[in-house]
Amino acid sequence: MSDNSPIILWFRRDLRLADHPALHAACETGRPVIPVFIHDEVVEATGAAPKFRLGLGVESFAATLAARGSRLTLRRGAALDVLRALVAETGAGAVWWSRLYDPEAKTRDTAVKAALKADGIDAKSFAGHLLFEPWEVETGTGGFYRVYSPMWRAVRDRDVGAELPAPGRLPAPDAWPASDVLAEWRMGAAMRRGADIVAAHACVGEDKAADRLAQFIATRIGPYKAERDFPAIPATSGLSENLTYGEISPRRIWYAGQRAMAEGAKGAEHFLKELVWREFAYHLVHHTPRITNDNWREEWNSFPWQTNAQAPEVQAWLQGRTGVPFVDAAMRQMYVTGTMHNRARMIVASYLTKHLMTHWKIGMDWFADCLTDWDPASNAMGWQWTAGSGPDAAPYFRIFNPVTQREKFDPDAAYVKAWIAEGQRNPPATALSYFDAVMVSWGLRPDAAYPAPVVTLEEGRARALEAYAAREGANAAT
């Protein structure tokens, strides 16, 4: 291959130009750069809402590239087959990409890299999805962190490197390879009628992500720590959506938070801690990939969670019809907006795994189908942390009471009223949108009666504590 052969830049969850190490390095060579997105086996397995949102991100990024005189080539098929075909068509001598760390992506990428190198192609992966590479953060004894707090103390003062500017131009090849038509992929098909409802709440693309960060820093980072747990208050950044698809780099957010902290913003350090919580999730996924599918704490393998997703009480949870207003409001927020407030995520996860004694995987998989900000590491760790089977987990006896949690964090029921229409004379549009977004087969109407609780909170708590005590006793006996 000549030194001027094109570089194929394989975009995945890094749909941005600024602070993009692989793109920056490719443009620095002066060689032609061919941006590519592949609807491959990993994309195909993605849940309905995140796949739909990924499609919106790809569409936006293609427009961004076009404005710079470049193009995003779209192809569908097995990643290695597509990349080999593009190499043959374009004469490319290199295929570069940004690293991902979940088990499915790592398995794919390892095989792709080995095969392309065997073909004589320069196959190379770059950082950019995280602040710190998981293998570069170690305890004093050389192992990986199993608890968040010491990891935070270890990395809070680390140099994360300088932000990289967006390229002024992307060198173009003499001829562009043929591209699929994005609309023909129908990435939102599984959303059915919910797509239009959720789309109205999406914040898509690099420019909007940057604006979202700037607005948060300017108006909300000060009271962030004090207000972030109140779901009716717009106190959080909302950047999880954009981080998921790489529309903004974690490094850009890190520096914005550090500047705010230096300027005296009270909530800035706590905001940075939340960014490192995401790092912790990926740290664990890299070192213990079983966390995405199996109990991280293996002693939980014998715990008697029920695993029937069709059980009536689980279906009530799925539909936001448990009879517990805080839980139901949170589930309905997810169906309308594609996201859910973080405090509410803990409440609904605790309710499912503890009050309903249902396996965390059922909830994790449902979130993976319904969240537009779905992240494989954060979703898995969050569910296991709440269930008690994960690292740095809440104690087994910590069972969130949805009633007292609402009284504390939604004292005037503003959040509940925003999302539950039943019983309100003039319910808001947010609450009514739920009925337009969910499946018709559920047969739900806003004028129906609100359901009675599927289990009393006292009964659910007692049942969970009995099971946890039995587990502790069995572990002690062995």
Image (cartoon, rainbow, N blue to C red):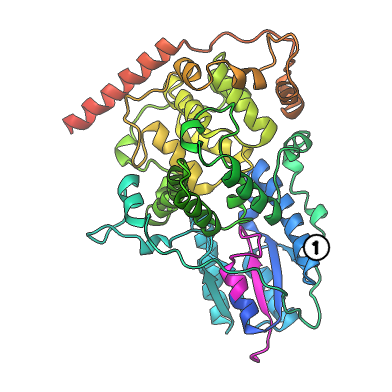
- Residue sitting at 76 percent across and 38 percent down? 200
Q: Amino acid at mark 1?
A: Asp
Vertical arrangement, residue 188 with respect to residue 59, above or below:
above
Q: Secondary structure at mark 1?
A: loop
Task: Identify whether 238 is placed above or below 176.
Answer: above
Image location (x, y in percent) of residue 107 = 50, 61
* Quadrant containing the C terminus in the rendered view: top left
Determine the residue located farthest toward the bottom in the rendered image.
Answer: 2
Image quadrant in which you'd find residue 203 = top right
Q: Which quadrant is home to the N terminus?
A: bottom right
Q: Is residue 311 visible?
A: no
Q: Name the residue tied to disc 1.
A: 180
Residue at image x 79%, y 74%?
177
Question: Would residue 9 be found to the left or right of residue 163 on screen?
Answer: right
Q: Is residue 12 magenta?
A: yes
Q: Position of residue 211 (x, y in %)?
A: 67, 50
Q: Nearer the viewer, residue 432 or 301?
A: 432
- Is 11 included in the stretch rendered in magenta? yes
Query: Which residue is drawn at the image coordinates 75% and 44% (left, top)?
Result: 188
Tell me the crowding category of disc 1: few under 14, some 14 to 19, or many 20 or more residues within 10 angstroms, Cα based. Answer: few
Q: Nearer the viewer, residue 178 or 172?
A: 172
Q: Which residues are magenta?
A: 1-24
